[in-house]
Amino acid sequence: MGAAGTAVVTGASSGIGAATARQLAAAGFDVVLGARREDRLAEIAAGIGPAARAHRLDVTDAGSVAEFAAAVPACAVLVCNAGGALGLDPVEAADDEQWRSMWESNVLGVVRTVRAFLPALVASGDGRLVVLTSIAGHEVYPNGAGYTSVKHAAAAITATLRLELLGRPVRVTEVAPGMVETEFSVVRFGGDAERAAGVYSGLTPLSADDVAEAICWAVTRPPHVTVARLDLLPRDQASARDAYRR
Ligand code: NJP
C-alpha cells in the first residue's frame, strides 16, 4: 500500500482528474480512478502503474456510486472532480436536458460521492476532501447560467461541509480554476473542436497539471492545515469575463 494512503479521483479519464491521479500517485498515494469511459481509465491507470486502479463510475447514478465506493474500503483523500459544462446559451433559451445533466453531475454527483466516502474519510483519521468548482462558482457571465448556477451550488455545498464536519478529522478544500485547456470546452460545445480551441486562443491557459499540482499541494499540508479555497487563473485572465488575448 502507498505510504500516503488511498486517494480517490472522480472524472479521472481526462484533463484535471487524470493529471491529479498521476501526481497523487507520484506523491505516494495509491490512487483509484473513476469515470464512465473505462478504456480511457484503464489506459491512464496502466500508465501510472501498480499504485493505480480503475473502476467505472457514473456520478449521476446512485447505484454506480454505491458500487464504486464498495470497491474502495479505505480512503484518505477524495477528489470530486467529475463534471463540466454543456452549452453556452441565454437563460431564455435554456435546454432542460443540458441543465438537468449539469445538475446531476456537478451537484448531485458531488453530494452522492461525498456521502458514500465520508465514513472512510473520517475513519482514516486525516481525511481530505477536494471539490473542483470553478471561477464560475463565484462569478456569473452572460449565457453561462447553466454552468455558473451548478458551480455556485457546488461551492455552497463545499462551504457547508466545512461547517458540518467541524470537529471531525476531515479537511475540506475547494479548488476554483479559471480557463484550463482540457476536454472541457470540446464537451461543452458538443464535440466542436474548432469552437473549443477558440476559448483558449491568444493566451496561455492553465494546464491540467497546473491544477493537479495545486491539489497535490493542498492535500499534502500537515494535518492541522486546511487549504480552504484555491483560486487559480491564467495570467491573462482577470475574471470570468475578462481575458487579454494577444
Ligand atoms: O474537463 P474534462 P476538466 N460520472 O472534460 C468526467 C472543472 N473545471 O478536466 O465519464 C463520472 O477533460 C469525465 O469522464 P467520463 C469542471 O467543471 C474545468 O477540465 O469518462 N465522471 C472526465 O474524466 C470539472 O468539474 C475548467 O466522460 C464524469 C471529467 O469528468 C473539473 O474541473 C475550469 C461524469 C471531465 O474532464 C474537471 O474538468 C473550471 C459522470 N457522470 C472548472 N461526467 C476548465 N477546463 O476550464 C463527466 O473553472 N465525468
Image (cartoon, rainbow, N blue to C red):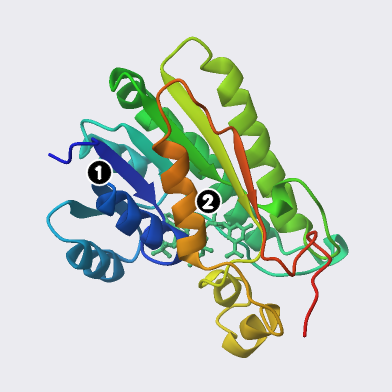
Estimate the x, y position of residue 104 in percent, counting from the top left.
Answer: 55, 48
Estimate the x, y position of residue 160 in percent, counting from the top left.
Answer: 63, 24
Q: Name the side, left or right, on which 238 lies relative to 122.
A: right
* Mark number, residue 105: 2
Crowding at mark 1 (Cα within 10 Å: few <14, some 14-19, many 20+): many
Residue 5 or residue 111, whichever sits in front: 5
Q: Secondary structure at mark 1?
A: loop
Q: Secondary structure at mark 2?
A: helix
Observer able to see residue 80 = no
Q: Is residue 37 above or below residue 155?
A: below
Name the quadrant containing residue 63. Answer: top left
Outermost residue toward the bottom in this view: 194
Observer able to see residue 11 = yes
Q: Is residue 154 above or below residue 22?
A: above
| C-alpha separation, residue under disc 2 versus residue under disc 1 | 26 Å
**Residue at 31% across, 58% down:** 22
Crowding at mark 2 (Cα within 10 Å: few <14, some 14-19, many 20+): many
Q: Earlier in the sequence, mark 2 or mark 1?
A: 1
Q: Which residue is mark 1?
A: 29
**Residue at 30% across, 41% down:** 7
Estimate the x, y position of residue 222 in percent, counting from the top left.
Answer: 40, 27
Q: Name the side, left or right, on which 82 lies relative to 78.
A: right
**Residue at 30% across, 53% down:** 33
The quadrant of the picture occupied by the C terminus is bottom right
Q: What's the amino acid at mark 2?
A: Ser
Estimate the x, y position of residue 111 in percent, counting from the top left.
Answer: 51, 35
Name the quadrant containing residue 153. Answer: top right
